[in-house]
Image (cartoon, rainbow, N blue to C red):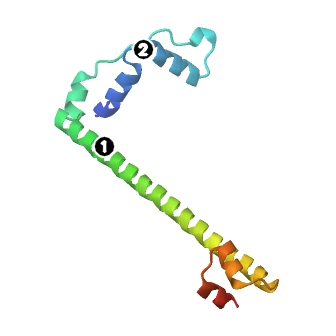
């Protein structure tokens, strides 16, 4: 029967190993105990033999860590690509919006009888674009 996962055990030791009061405080906080029922001390059962029989070897632990490191790198790269795509999409949308606004302004200026050269200067539209609007 497997009692410990050596990867989880390493994490457990990192969190609680040098700070035994953290474990007591955590367990006391999670349980609804009266003052006289609070955990005062902890005792670890000898599980070294079970860990040896059911745990990962050092090579397996390194491979496990390497796998999760590669997953982390891949997620970071995907997030970066997503962010870059969002920025490019926003810039393109902004450009299209400005162009549409310039066309609307040019239409209004043409309706007011303004000359094409002035409309080109103010809106930044080309002569062909203004001709298409007319």
Q: Position of residue 68 (x, y in %)?
A: 31, 44
- For the view shown, which residue lies furthest in the right direction? 112
Q: Which mark is residue 33?
A: none
Residue nearest the observer in this picture, 117 or 133: 117
Residue 111 at x, y percent in the picture: 80, 85
Between residue 127 and residue 23, name the one nearer to us.
Answer: 127
Tell me the residue at 33%/18% (across/down). Answer: 45
Q: Give the SS element for disc 1.
A: helix
| Quadrant in the rendering for residue 16 | top left
On screen, residue 123 above or below 42: below
Image point 35% across, 22% down: which residue? 13
Kindly identify the residue that appears in the image at 40 percent across and 55 percent down: 78
Mark 1–mark 2 distance (CA, rounded to whole Å): 27 Å
Give the number of the mark in front: 1 or 2: 1
Residue bearing the label numbered 1: 69
Closest to the observer, 15 or 97: 97
Residue at x-position 23% and y-position 34%: 54
114 sits left or right of 26 in the view: right
- What is the number of the mark on residue 19? 2
Of the two numbered discs 1 and 2 on the same chain, state the one appearing first in sequence.
2
- Label 1 packing within 10 angstroms: few (<14), some (14-19), many (20+): few
Q: Secondary structure at mark 2?
A: loop
Q: Position of residue 69 (x, y in %)?
A: 31, 43
x, y (%) of residue 106? 72, 80
Disc 2 crowd, CA 10 A, few/some/many (<14, 14-19, 20+): few
- From what the image shows, is residue 2 above or below residue 44? below
């Amino acid at each position: 029967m497997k009692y410990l996962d050596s990867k989880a055990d390493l994490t457990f030791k990192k969190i609680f190993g040098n700070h035994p009061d953290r474990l007591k405080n955590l367990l006391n906080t999670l349980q609804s105990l009266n003052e006289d029922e609070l955990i005062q001390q902890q005792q670890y059962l000898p599980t070294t033999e079970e860990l040896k029989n059911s745990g990962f070897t050092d090579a397996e632990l390194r491979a496990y860590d390497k796998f999760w490191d590669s997953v982390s790198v891949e997620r970071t790269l995907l997030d970066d690509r997503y962010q870059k795509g969002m920025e490019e999409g926003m810039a393109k949308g902004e450009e299209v919006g400005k162009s549409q606004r310039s066309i609307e302004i040019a239409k209004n200026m043409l309706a007011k009888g303004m000359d094409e050269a002035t409309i080109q200067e103010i809106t930044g539209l080309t002569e062909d674009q203004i001709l298409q609007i007319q």
